[in-house]
Each structure stands twice: as structure tokens, then as C-alpha cells.
Amino acid sequence: MNRLRELSSQVMDVYQSLSQEFSAYQSSQSLNCVEKCGACCNNPDIEVSPLEMLPLALHLFDTGRAEQAFDELDSYSGFACKQYQRLSLDGKEGYCGIYEYRPGICRMFGAAGYKTKSGEATLSVCKPIKQAVPEKYAAALIAIQPQHLDIFEKRLVDDIAANSEVRVTSTKPPMIAEGRQKLAQLDYELGERLMPINDALRFVLEKILTLSFYAQDIDGGVAA
């Protein structure tokens, strides 16, 4: 268990670095998340590694809620992140119930860089942000690779350029793949495999509860 605690501390250190790096870029480009938006939290395709859920799992264990959380996840049939707290019936508005312990992808998502199949760096911006600040999105696209925009993006850029005074800066976005690698290299066993967010938390909770059970069993045997 001590090894997992050390690992969790290392994960949180990387989280702090990622949060600062990605937030700085998003703020500099005015591509911040829309307030109360729950689009990504409701996306069933969001995957994380068990390693990303380790700090939350240990927090639940230390506060005596690990078994309850595991049982709830075991019987949960929904696809959205179970930690998402809805503020509207349709789930479009809400907030993260475990913000301090949110996984790495949540700290990088919204506006970030990634590489295409041809190896070109490009920009990934979620739909709500694109719709909220289209002129900022266009400016960020111009900054990263003006020569590789698709037809839709070129039209958007031309329209914005003709009707806006938005200033284009040359800031390059941090890459999601590099952020994932910083986490995975801490422990490849827990950090390489990606799975749905609820499954990842359940996986690492089971590991912690199993280790705790055998530790108690050994202590009991020694005491006897």
C-alpha cells in the first residue's frame, strides 16, 4: 500500500504541472471551458488509466468510503462519469464532484494539441467552446497550422478575419499525448491501459481493497 501512496503523490505532482500548463494555454487563447458545461462528463467515450484514478481511490479509502464506492460502481449502469453532479434534468449543466482528484484527461481536455495520422500538430477544441467563442477558435487554428486547415475551418477563419479584430498569437498548444505519457511513465502497469472512467476507478478500488484485506489478514496472523 505504501508503494501506491508514493505513486499517488507523484501523480498529483504531475496533475499540478498539467493543470498549470493546459490552463495557461487555454486562458491565453480565451478558450476556457463554458461555465457549468457537462458535455465531456456525459461523454461515454472518455477513457482514462487506472493510474489517473489512484488519488481519488486512496482518498475514498482513507475516508472510509472505498467499499461503498466500489459497490455503487459495480451496480452502476450509466455511461456518464458517476462523479458528475447534474444541475439540469438533461445533464447538460453540472459540475465535477471530485474536482481536486479529477483524472489527467479532465485537466487537458477542452482545448489542447494532438497529432494527425500524418504527424501534423493540430488543435482539438470541444464543440461548446467552439460555439461560444468561434473567433477565438479561428485565431488559435491560424496560430498552430494555417496551411493545414480543412474546408470548414478555412471558411470560418476567413469569415472571422473579415469581421473581427481578434489578434492572432503564435502560442502552440500543449499536447494531450505528451501529458498522458508523463503520467504513464510513472507506472506502466497502471498507466498504459485505458478504459471507461467508471471502470478505471472500480479497477483501482478493487486493487486497494484487496491489498488492504491481505494486509489485515497478515497483521491478524502475526498478532495471533
Image: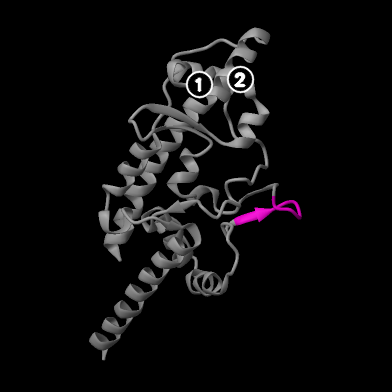
State whether the magenta stretch is mostly helix, strand or loop: loop
Q: Quadrant of residue 2?
A: bottom left
The residue sitting at 30% across, 86% down in the picture is: 220
Residue 70 left/right relative to 40:
left
As displayed, is residue 176 above or below residue 47? above
Residue 177 left/right relative to 149:
left
- Which callout, 2 or 1, points at the residue further toward the start of the chain? 1
Point out the stretch of residues depicted in magenta.
84-91
The residue sitting at 36% across, 70% down in the picture is: 207
As displayed, is residue 137 above or below residue 103? above
Q: Position of residue 145 (x, y in %)?
A: 43, 19
* Residue that label 2 marks: 156
Judging depth in this view, the residue of 216 and 89 nearest the camera is: 89
Judging depth in this view, the residue of 217 and 139 nearest the camera is: 139
Q: Tell me the tag on residue 141.
A: 1
Foreground mark, 2 or 1, reads 2
Q: Position of residue 136 (x, y in %)?
A: 59, 20
